[in-house]
Image (tube, rainbow, N blue to C red):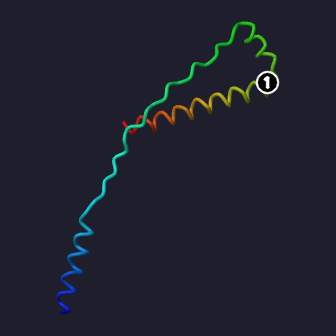
Amino acid sequence: MHSIKILILSALIGSGCTSKVIVKQPPLPLPNRPALPILTNQENLDFKKFNLNTYKKILKRESLRKIYIQQLEAIIKSTH
């Protein structure tokens, strides 16, 4: 009786250790980039009226936004 329990226990343990579950992520769709508004010459001149500190903050924000978008695109493309 004791040997049957050991045999059953060994079979359960042995079969559970050898099975692998592999999950494959389906490719994520890459969304289209939005069309960004283009500034006219007059708007560019108005933009230059910002003080230097504000101008630097805007440039920094846009730079960080572009980097973030590139990182997200790389993550999505890694699923393909």
Front in this rendered view, residue 16 or 69: 16
Q: Callout 1: helix, strand or loop? A: helix
Where is 44 relative to 57, above or below? above
* Quarter of the figure that contains the C terminus: top left
Q: Quadrant of residue 69?
A: top right
Residue at the outermost bottom position: 1
Q: Position of residue 67 (x, y in %)?
A: 56, 32
Tell me if mark 1 has few (under 14), some (14-19) or many (20+) residues whose alpha carbon lies within 10 angstroms of its own. Answer: few
Q: Is residue 24 above or below residue 32?
A: below
Q: Is residue 77 left or right of residue 45?
A: left
Residue 8 location, quadrant: bottom left
Name the residue located 41 percent from the left edge and 34 percent from the top edge: 77
Front-lying residue, 75 or 24: 24
Task: Give the amino acid type for the residue marked by disc 1 in the picture.
Answer: Leu
Which residue is rendered at x = 40% and y = 38% of the image?
78
Residue drawn at x 68%, y 31% is 61
Q: How many marks?
A: 1
Residue 46, relative to residue 26: is it above or below? above
Determine which quarter of the picture holds residue 39.
Answer: top right
* Residue indicated by mark 1: 52
Q: Is residue 2 left or right of residue 45?
A: left
Q: Position of residue 22 (x, y in %)?
A: 31, 53
Q: Name the image quarter holding the N terminus.
A: bottom left
Residue 40 in picture, x, y percent from top left = 69, 8
Horizontal and vertical percent position of residue 28: 42, 37
Q: Residue at x 43, y 33 (%)?
A: 29
Extreme residue toward the top, this view: 41
Nearest the viewer among 41 and 11 is 11
